[in-house]
Amino acid sequence: MTMVLTPLEDKGTGIRSLSETAADDLLRGLRKTELWGRLGWLEVKRRYRRTTIGPFWNSITLAIYVLTVGTVGAAIWHQNIYDYLPFLVSGMIVWTLVASIITDSCNLFIAGQSLFRNIRLDYSVLAYAMVWRNFIVLLHNFAVYFLVVVVLKPSLLSFTALLAVPGLALVLMNGIWVSLLLGMLCLRFRDVPQLVSSIMQIAMLITPLFWPADTLTGIKRFVFVNLNPLYHVVDVVRAPLLGRVPEAISYGAMIAMTIGGWWLTYAMFKRFRKRIAYWS
Amino acid sequence: MATIILENVNAHFPIYGQQRSLRKALFQRATGASIEHEGRNNDRLSVKALTDISLTLHDGDRVGLIGHNGAGKSTLLKLMAGIYEPVSGTIKVEGRVTPLFDTMPGLDRDDTGYENIITSGMLIGMTRRQIEAKIPEIEEFCELGEYLGLPVRTYSTGMTMRLGFALVTAMDPGVLLMDEGFGTGDLRFAERAEARMKNFVGRSSIMVLASHSDKTIRSMCNKAIMMDAGRIVASGPVNEICDQYYESVHTSAVADHRSRLGKGTSTGYSASNVAGKEQIDVDGWIENVGLADRLMRTNGSARMTRVAARDAHGNARWDFVPGETATFRFEYKILERVDNAAILFRLNLVTPGGGEVIFAERREVLSSEPLEAGFEGALELSLQVPDLMPNQYLPYVWLGRTSNAGAYDVVDVNIGLPPFVVRPSSEQTSRGGILSLAFEAKQSGTLRQDAFTKVDAL
């Protein structure tokens, strides 16, 4: 049935279609720094509202964890405590970031539906806000690293440590595609969040966080270290913090993951972005 | 210049993870056309929300979308806003769109009023600088004073609404898309707010308003589109379409009313279907009646299972003579945990011109505490029927959050509730109006010869 309320004069000329592309969504969303910056920051603020030290509670929990587990772990793995604690703390800082980005991704569009079902919102804004929020928490956690390193091994604070910055950039770039991909998947299939949380629990144990990668040799090392993407994700940031340059294979894996992950995510986002509102 | 063009737009909603029993209920009860089976084994369920919508709107158009619950009004608005994208067809919109479906998107009750103004403003599409420039105006209008520096959880519902209204109306509307309930339905605005609303709408280039009240649409629009079951049924000048809608909804009710007035008294309620919908039995069990309509419009967290009316002797009937006592019984059950619940019961008198004159409304809080899934409850309201004009009064039952926002279920004449009929009583004196006032009559008169002086000329 066709209905024209007023005669249509300039059919189609100069009128943009409402359905925009996935690239539009990603780029326009990225440019709204003010919006995702605020959404991410408010989320941090809300979590620690009415506390005196705010997000540093996270850091304190991490510090206690590292001190206790570190003392026990140093004995179990026969490590020197001056080497083991900096290793544990820098690994845990990155792991906290990675693990919370992955778990938060599962809830990204489920929690965001009250927004995008009522206003027009670029979906990517939610992803940027979430990654930004976890980055803010990471910065607070760095305080623990500095404390441990200054006390136990100040020599680690060298120029090599600056290599952590490009490593972190790679991690965050991967964080954004992970959040969009998992966000869509979890919105449509509500079993996925459960699956992801159980995988993450196991991943924490089999990724070299508590034990140095070199404790494994041969085929075991190949499977749990070289083939484990999470090892590379952690190590591109952790190694510089421990005064080492990350292995070339880690950078290679990260770059491959960034390209492959974004390619897959972009294809999925392009295909299913229009369905997101319907899935909620 | 703003323009909205829709060409052959279709929208379907997939339904995921429904219980088998609910599916069965949907298959059996729904009006066949709107629910479809898809997939290999016909096991995917989807609701066809809009079918082949084509329309063109230009600057200055004030368009009302009118239709029953579930006719597709809100879905159409959300498509125009770009929130849902059509399954097929194209939508072209020129000009900035302001969708007003939620007065304060992203509202956080722990943030202060000022913080929420900025967050919501940004989400609606303003920059921080633009919002900050508007703050004095918002402060002045909402009259919240120092409360703006306090967390929103300390506000009353009315204060929160005032804040949202002040914020939204401070912005540049562009193409304005509104769902009923925003500033026109549930809120009773003071004159000041009404003036501000008029001004706000006046500044918009195009306004589209969805409502099932033709009165609202007549007062705010110059064109109207009537929708039914996801299709455009008619469109044109507002009064013409609203008359048509009024006819379609109330034809049978009005005819029945006229014949009743003509015949004087009659016994029992035996009107034919209202608006062609299935009739509810005399005991008022409505749990699965018109479910597709109801689920499209509400979140389905709870359901009215029964709406019945009884007289003082316990007989089920919906027709009464003034002076009798009518008892309305509402039974409901909670399907998923809700924070609180309230029932709003309204009886509307619809005038032959089509306007709704609300004559009775009662809101009862069922629970301000959370209710768990599986809870079943009932509410009874008794009314001594006043000396009303003999007529049909259309019932409307709303079950939802105590804050008036967020309906769990809505039941009214659209799904087949019978009208509440007031029959003429023997003492009826008035021939018009709504209410007969009970005058006490006393007459007197004496002949006084001495007091009478005729003045011949001045």
Image: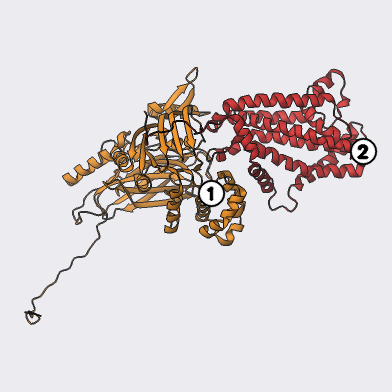
For image coordinates 59% across by 38% down, the residue present is: A112
Q: Is residue B64 left or right of A50 when viewed as pictured?
A: left
Helix or strand or loop: what does disc 1 sit on?
A: loop
* Quarter of the view holding residue A85: top right
Q: Are marks 1 and 2 on the same chain?
A: no
| Percent x, y of residue A103 | 68, 34
Q: CA distance from mark 1 to mark 2?
A: 55 Å
Q: Which mark is residue A82?
A: 2
> What is the chain identity of the residue bearing mark 2?
A
* Name of the residue lying farthest toward the bottom: B450
Residue A96 horizontal/vertical position (percent): 76, 37
Q: What percent of the width, then of the height, locates residue B261?
A: 19, 46
Identify by letter the chain in red: A
- Looking at this view, is A210 or A268 the one in front? A268
Q: Is residue B44 visible?
A: yes
- Residue B369 got which mark? 1
- Depth check, mark 1 against mark 2: the one in front is 2
Secondary structure type for disc 2: helix
Report the side of B202 relative to B371 (left or right): left
Q: Residues within 10 Å of mark 2 (few under 14, many from 20)?
A: some
Output the letter for the chain in orange: B
Q: Residue B313, percent across and down?
A: 29, 48
- The amino acid on which the numbered mark 1 sits, given as a three-letter code, is Glu
Q: In the depicted view, which residue is nearer to us: A200 or A120?
A: A120
Q: Is residue A61 visible?
A: no
User: Is residue B38 placed above or below B181 in the rendered structure?
Assistant: above
User: Measured along the vertical axis of the image, is residue A250 above or below residue B364?
Assistant: above
User: Which amino acid type corresponds to the residue marked 2 in the rendered image?
Assistant: Tyr
- Quadrant for the C terminus of chain B, please: bottom left
Which residue is at 70% across, 23% downward? A260
Pinpoint the chain carrying mark 1.
B
Residue B388 is left or right of residue A140, and the answer is left
